[in-house]
């Protein structure tokens, strides 16, 4: 998965809560960070989203 659109295809609404917990932020802010490439924590949010998306793929979700 190379870009955010591909990552988002493998994320469900509950996964944003997981991403938020990994970064210590709220679910709402995690969703906002993925849409703002100039945000300070954008790269961290993308890495966390990749981990969650990869685990979803491994589980077949």
Image: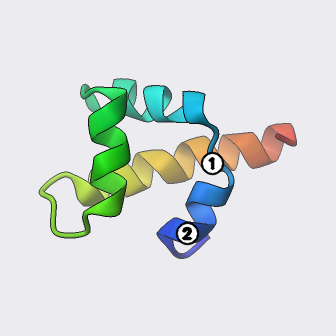
Residue 18 percent location from the top left of the image: 48, 27
Q: Residue at x 43, y 35 (%)?
A: 19
* Residues at marks 1 and 2, CA–CA distance in whole angstroms: 11 Å
Q: Is residue 32 left or right of residue 15?
A: left
Q: Residue at x 55, y 76 (%)?
A: 2
Viewer-side label of 1, 2: 2
| 54 in relation to 61, above or below | below
Q: Give me the disc on residue 5.
A: 2
> Label 2's element?
helix
Residue 40 percent location from the top left of the image: 12, 56
Residue 37 percent location from the top left of the image: 25, 69
Res 15 → quadrant: top right
Residue 31 percent location from the top left of the image: 37, 45
Q: Is residue 9 left or right of residue 27?
A: right
| 3 in relation to 23, above or below | below
Quadrant occupied by the N terminus = bottom right
Query: Residue extending furthest right?
Result: 60
Kindly identify which residue carries mark 1: 53
């Amino acid at each position: 998965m190379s870009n955010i659109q591909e990552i988002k295809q493998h994320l469900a609404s509950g996964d944003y809560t997981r991403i938020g917990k990994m970064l210590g932020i709220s679910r709402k802010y995690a969703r906002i960070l993925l849409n703002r490439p100039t945000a300070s924590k954008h790269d961290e949010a993308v890495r966390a989203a990749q981990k969650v998306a990869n685990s979803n793929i491994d589980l077949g979700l």
